[in-house]
């Protein structure tokens, strides 16, 4: 197969981790006889510095012409001025919206050998295998009005959370489709006791559930869900929720997997095109130090092979290589434990690429 994969490294550790993901994809290409090309483009702070905008037209065009996008991370102290008219996140939000990527899949899996990397008790986290489906193109991140202004009582700001039934239905359906290949349980998360959008969410989710009778659908309030995630995470199979709740719950869930550096994601729409990125940000304090864990980005590359290119054995070959390297005792700093060999970003990428084999 020949596929063009757009690489948008972004800022901070983004370039370091996407380089290692690319290494894994090149190893797969060589082993299985595929040809992948990796044109790169600017996004985020790097794009603001060079072009004045967080997502230049050329970057958007490149993504539209590609089979998939491998994304690093954006942001950093240099662009943190809250009053700046152009901000790095605008690039990522415009990309998600422009490409129609409404379902963000965030698997949370704890490798047995990393049980000690979690700050939670081994008996709580052992065997965790859940996936959060975060709605990605609606809610507070896109609702209008969203602005700051001077009101009669001083400074004011407003954000708007809004959802249409179609936006809710399609992402809940995506969650049901995923659950069908797993343990057939979907937990829909909302705040229906307070928010109108959540009452609509619950109503529509229940309707979608009724159209998928083979799936067990349950509804949980987001505050209870946050608590249950650290109390008894193994009760969950697929969680589906709106944009902001999903963002917060998956950072919390990263503790189950040992580190932010372990969690990949796939952002999907109606077609095969997808955007693949680690859930973490640009980790400015680690940037340029060869300290970042590249596994989240590498596992995102595996998701790219599976969801955008339908290359299932190839995706599994990357996931197997990651497991082997961890089983062999190699760790980056963030998941360091007693009696393990701590390596840098590049070395971890090399080790994983070198272990990619056919099963
Ligand atoms: N999708 C994105 O690009 C995205 C997501 C979240 C935050 N951000 C941006 O990133 C910047 C930093 O934000 P933050 O510090 O809140 O979040 P962050 O995810 O960058 O970092 C949170 C913590 O996790 C650690 N961490 C993150 N990735 C890691 C990795 N691969 N290996 C080891 N440790 C890792 C960091 O050192 C830090 O302690 C901000 O500008 C923020 O806006 C971007």
Image (tube, rainbow, N blue to C red):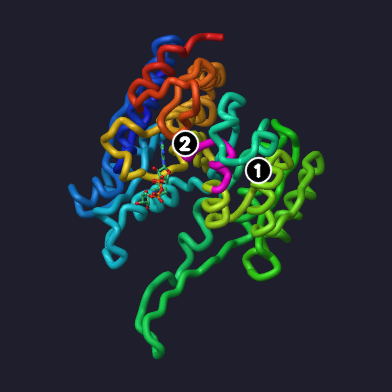
Q: Is residue 127 left or right of residue 268?
A: right
| Percent x, y of residue 172 | 66, 48
**Rendered position, 192 above or below 315:** below
User: Under tag 2, what secondary structure?
Assistant: loop
Is residue 147 highlighted in magenta?
A: no
Marking on residue 31: none
Asked whether residue 311 appears in the rendered view, the answer is no
Q: Which residues are magenta?
A: 252-260
Residue at horizontal 30 percent and vertical 57 percent from the top: 87
Please tell me how crowded label 1 is: few (under 14), some (14-19), or many (20+) other residues with Cα within 10 Å: many
What residue is disc 1 on?
175
**Ligand 1 positioned in quadrant:** top left
* Rendered location of residue 100, percent (x, y): 48, 48
Left or right of 347, for residue 228: right
Residue 165 in picture, x, y percent from top left: 64, 59
Q: Horizontal and vertical percent for residue 178?
A: 66, 37
Task: Check if residue 257 falls in the magenta segment.
Answer: yes
Nearer to us of marks 1 and 2 is 1
Name which quarter of the figure residue 202 lies in: bottom right
Answer few, some or many: residues within 10 Å of disc 2's Cα (few below 14, many 20 plus, some between 14 and 19): many
* Disc marking residue 273: 2
Given residues 6 and 18, the one toward you in this image is 18
Q: Earlier in the sequence, mark 1 or mark 2?
A: 1
């Amino acid at each position: 197969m020949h596929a063009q994969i757009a690489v948008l490294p972004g800022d901070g550790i983004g370039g370091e981790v996407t380089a290692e993901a690319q290494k894994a994809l090149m190893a797969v290409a060589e082993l299985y006889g595929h040809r992948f090309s990796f044109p790169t483009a600017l996004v985020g702070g790097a794009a603001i510095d060079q072009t004045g905008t967080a997502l230049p037209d050329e970057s958007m065009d490149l993504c539209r012409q590609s089979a998939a996008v491998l994304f690093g991370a954006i942001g950093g102290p240099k662009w943190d001025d809250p009053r700046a008219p152009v901000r790095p996140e605008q690039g990522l939000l415009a990309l998600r919206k422009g490409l129609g990527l409404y379902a963000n899949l965030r698997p949370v899996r704890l490798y047995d050998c990393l049980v000690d990397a979690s700050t939670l008790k081994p008996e709580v986290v052992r065997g965790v295998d859940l996936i959060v489906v975060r709605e990605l193109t609606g809610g507070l991140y896109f609702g209008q009005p969203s602005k700051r202004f001077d009101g009669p009582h001083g400074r004011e700001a407003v954000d708007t959370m809004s959802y249409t039934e179609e936006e809710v239905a399609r992402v809940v359906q995506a969650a049901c489709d995923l659950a069908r290949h797993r343990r057939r349980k979907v937990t829909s998360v909302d705040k229906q006791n307070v928010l109108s959008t959540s009452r609509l969410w619950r109503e529509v989710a229940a309707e979608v559930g009724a159209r998928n009778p083979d799936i067990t659908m349950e509804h949980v309030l987001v505050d209870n869900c946050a608590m249950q995630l650290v109390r008894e995470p193994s009760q969950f199979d697929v969680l589906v929720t709106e944009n902001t709740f999903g963002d917060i719950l998956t950072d919390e869930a990263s503790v189950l997997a040992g580190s932010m550096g372990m969690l990949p994601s796939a952002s999907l729409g109606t077609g095969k095109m997808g955007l693949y990125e680690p859930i973490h940000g640009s980790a400015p304090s680690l940037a340029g130090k060869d300290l970042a864990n590249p596994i989240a980005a590498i596992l995102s590359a595996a998701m790219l092979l599976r969801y955008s290119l339908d290359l299932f054995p190839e995706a599994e070959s990357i996931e197997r290589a990651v497991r082997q390297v961890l089983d062999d005792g190699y760790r980056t700093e963030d998941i360091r434990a007693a009696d393990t060999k701590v390596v840098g970003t590049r070395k971890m990428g090399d080790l994983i690429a070198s272990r990619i084999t056919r099963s």
